[in-house]
Image (spheres, rainbow, N blue to C red):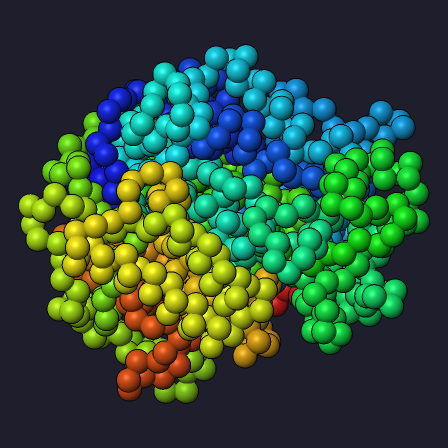
Amino acid sequence: MGTGGPATGVALHAPAPGWSLAADVVVVGSGVAGLTAALRCAAAGLETVVVTKARLDAGSTRWAQGGIAAALGDGDTPQQHLDDTLVAGAGLCDEDAVRLLVTEGPDAVRRLIDTGAHFDESADGGLALTREGGHHRRRIAHAGGDATGAEISRALVDAVRARGIPTVENALVLDLLTDAEGHAAGVTLHVMGEGQHDGVGAVHAPSVVLATGGMGQVYSATTNPAVSTGDGVALALRAGAEVSDLEFVQFHPTVLFLGPDAEGQQPLVSEAVRGEGAHLVDADGVRFMVGQHELAELAPRDIVAKGIMRRMREQGTEHMYLDARHFGADMWERRFPTILAACRAHGMDPVTEPVPVAPAAHYASGGVRTDADGRTTVPGLYACGEVACTGVHGANRLASNSLLEGLVYAERIAADIIRADGAGHPARVPVATARPDAPTDAYPPAHTGVRPHTGVPTRSDEPAGSDVPTQPDVSTQRDVSTQPEVPAGSDVPAYPLLGADARFRIQRIMTDGAGVLRSAASLARAAAQLQELHDAARGDLVEHGKTAEPGVDTWETTNLLCVARVLVAAALRREETRGCHWREDHADAVDDWRRHLVVRLAADRALTLTTTRAENFPPTLVPEPASALAPGPAPVPDGTAPRPDAYADAAPAGTPRAGTAPAGPADDAPARPTPAGTPPRAAADTSPGAPHGPSTADRPTAARPQEH
């Protein structure tokens, strides 16, 4: 690439690194996914460094209450776990990815126990298992009653410290470093506060593992901690990686309602409370979920969240109630001590009264798109945990599959890195940046029009009688004539950072326009308001040469705007209701939309949205030489050239362009390349660390059971 920065040429405005470390692997994040990957790599003798945004034990994992799902109980099987996962995923799970999860999961949990995690036991000394929403079996292993994440975090942190793995705490990752071939070569980061390394620095490593968690802070109220600002997804977009399924944000149905103006991290009331027999009721004590689904309160989370929202709208109220008074004080204190303490801290006592609950942003089912070994479309860059999109969760995550996914796919990433290291891959040297004092920002510049696609057919080329909805004509060239650039050689950055005060505005825009209930009007309004924030910052830069001062608050806010704009664009494009994506103006699931939206930030800084052919991701192929791909992208497996459905990043989302038909799905996602030098994968092997078998993206798909 010649710049050492992301393939897109877009990077956060930050000072040049003032210090550096060298390693074989750098893991960004200290939850179950990040620490598992680090432990496995270090055990194989690889020099591994863990970078984490807060303390080593302060990741999202520690907030997990319910537990970790795996087929560990008598009579349970991986096939039953797979079936429940597919139903919850509403037709969009990659079945191969789910099969890996459920077959490798039980042994992965046993290895976690061997690492030192202590789970609650039953009277006979076996694992005490509970149920949660969407599960037909008791398969949720838990610890400390409702403190599973804290126990898993404790065990993994202890193991990391015992092994002496170097860690850099209180460090916000900024951007990916690459070598001359575009292969990952490390990351830049900013360390907050006092320590051996302060300020902006770099960790040089040929393998980079993103395990940065979610992006819940893009909403006003969320169960996510304050550090969940979408940093990993934003970094990956700037690096040129593909992102998928961001429109599927899971809103947990039972978050303690603290008032309509409550903001920030909200107390979660675990699904396990309903798994043990608690009821959802309205103000009159009516169990409104009975009759809406065969599992009533234990339906998949999207079904329960919708049921709560419908009842709230019918009755004109802001919350429903969770009634578990029949548990008694002893069970509350023994089984759910954390939740009991949180309720009482806010003046509520679930032992004696129903507690108010309402849905709040909880989990990103989508993220950085990976294959079965956690590889992204950028060579040497891996992703696992909530930041990743493996295809496991589909349109809605099954309860307690998140910890398992982080565990299983982290092990697979480590195995892939170890194999690559054994093959003698050389260390990667970042290319020096041309202007380290003035990189670009975290999201594309404003412009009209779309990315050119010369030679690529549009949906107008569909045979007569095709039932695939017509696509808009995307032949318009980008028009940046109204967007002046900062003069070459200027001492100011090319693009702006947002001020920290914009964070609240972003959260309110997203809550109002892209929350549980969405429509074309609300999403278009959100897109326009997000654009205004960008334009205002850009105007200050162009007219006055000013931008926000680089720092943690401004970097986080800029990352939030980046992921917010992608989320809104994808939600607007998906004109159906599926899983946790609820469109009021498109109330039903549409079979033609049983596919994934894939987003990429192109070298010209335009966001492109494409769709896969089916619910599974396209197969992973070895890339052809660049000359062989000119002038268009690589063909999909059946030989049909894909059409990059380019979204002009600044175009008012939701407004059809002149002379175009409404947008709908298209069979147009290009096949995803693996890192250079990786052989094509052959027959499936589901043993831990084994390469994943061929994808079934283009096979005919049989109908799967959906939620009742």
Nearest the camera: 651 or 352?
Answer: 352
Q: Give the vertical position of 312 relative to 229 (above or below).
A: below
Nearest the camera: 455 or 328?
Answer: 328
Quarter of the figure with residue 479: bottom left
Q: Is residue 664 left or right of residue 676?
A: right
**How many numbered callouts?**
0
Nearest the camera: 399 or 543?
Answer: 543
Query: Residue drawn at (72%, 74%), measured in percent from left and top?
Result: 316
Quarter of the figure that contains the C terminus: bottom right
Query: Residue drawn at (13%, 57%), measured in percent from left and top?
Result: 485
Nearest the camera: 140 or 235?
Answer: 235
Q: Position of residue 1 (x, y in %)?
A: 16, 42
Q: Give the vertical position of 164 relative to 236 (above or below).
A: above
Q: Position of residue 37 (x, y in %)?
A: 48, 28
Query: Residue drawn at (54%, 12%), measured in percent from left and top?
Result: 162
* Visible residue check, residue 5: yes
Q: Is residue 528 left or right of residue 116?
A: left
Q: Position of residue 11 (x, y in %)?
A: 26, 44
Q: Position of residue 167 (x, y in %)?
A: 44, 21
Q: Give the vertical position of 698 relative to 337 (above or below).
A: below
